[in-house]
Image (spheres, rainbow, N blue to C red):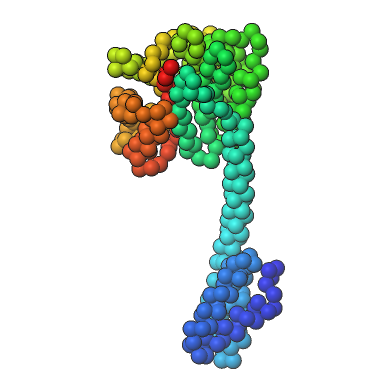
Amino acid sequence: MKFVTFRFEKDYSKFLNGYIKEGDEKYLYNINKWSKEAISQGVSPEEIVGIHRTALLTIPEKLPDIVLSSLEVLMTVMVNYGADYRRNLIIKKQQEELQKEILKAGKIQKSLLQTEIPSKEHLDVGVCDKPANQMSGDYYHFFENETAITVSLADVIGKGIPAALAMSMLKYGMQNAPDDVVSVSGMLSYLNKVVEENISDNMFITMFLGVYDKSNKVFTYSSAGHEIGFWYNALDNEYQDLYAKGLMLGIQEEVTYHEYQRSLSIGDFIVVLSDGVTETRIGDGFIERETLKELIYSFHELSAQDIADNVYKKLVELQNFKLYDDFTLIIIKRIA
């Protein structure tokens, strides 16, 4: 027996004989401790049966043949059981190692994809980003210069490490776009080529991309099949959809995207979101867009970050505090 020492077997025999002769539960306590040590040493089930059989044979009284025969049957059963037991231990160890690797990858992903929220000189920006698992399939990014503020939100159709790698590639593509890519639609067309050339055929990315011009207060945006967001018009106290039609990134090589514009007044805000928000489960279906609008409106006087945080709390409560998909909600409110 590979894992079993003579002392280990002898201890079991002593405890078993003691309990049979005296019936004292202290021997059961010792056997319980012994079994924990057996588990820690990787002693298999069939080895346990063998140790028990050997210990029984040390009893002075002759054992009935039926007892020994039954142990032989049990030993035969435990051989297959033990093989499965060892395979399960190997699988469990592999799963634990994989889980550690995923946690490490999640931390690396978070570090690689981190972005800086724009200053509050022109816009009040709030973000609530909650991954359903250790690694998120959502990616958002902000970029601010002297003239404009850019916001992007992408969602990979797929999860786990491949999705995280795709997101890293997308960020690299945005940061290294050619100088002649200056428009929102042009950037999406460029990123579409990057995705189409570099990720697998069964993985696609939706993306919303918008630029706020600080001088004329206009928000120009385009979409590659991404979830439709909202524009809240403070003057008229009403919502309008940020409708933008476009093919997902990576489906075909040459795609032309269209641009749309909204003029923002003080108090207006833009809502950009992933499908993890609109697919909040209520009963047997998903939340209605009108219900979602009403929920966002109920917090509209708060700061952008408080709006995003409170909406998340309410939605996750509606589905019993369980996330079924990555959740990203971005609020962009004009304050000056």
Residue 24: give x, y in percent of width and height: 49, 87
Residue 198 lies left or right of residue 228; in this view the side is right
**Residue at 46%, 20% in the rendered image:** 123
**Residue at 61%, 70% in the rendered image:** 38
Residue 305 sits in quarter: top left
Q: Vertically, is 133 above or below 216?
A: below
Can residue 272 be seen by looking at this rendering? Answer: no
Can residue 213 be seen by looking at this rendering? Answer: yes
Q: Vertically, is 316 above or below 258?
A: below
**Residue at 36%, 29% in the rendered image:** 302
Residue 116: give x, y in percent of width and height: 56, 27
Q: Quadrant of the C terminus?
A: top left
**Residue at 58%, 16% in the rendered image:** 145
Q: How many marks?
A: 0
Q: Vertically, is 251 above or below 288?
A: above
Considering depth in this image, is 9 or 126 the residue closer to the camera?
Answer: 126
Residue 233 lies left or right of residue 19; in this view the side is left
Considering depth in this image, is 48 or 53 the residue closer to the camera?
Answer: 48
Q: Quadrant of the N terminus?
A: bottom right
Considering depth in this image, is 54 or 309 the residue closer to the camera?
Answer: 309
Considering depth in this image, is 84 or 332 the residue closer to the camera?
Answer: 332
Residue 224: give x, y in percent of width and height: 50, 17
Residue 215: give x, y in percent of width and height: 49, 9
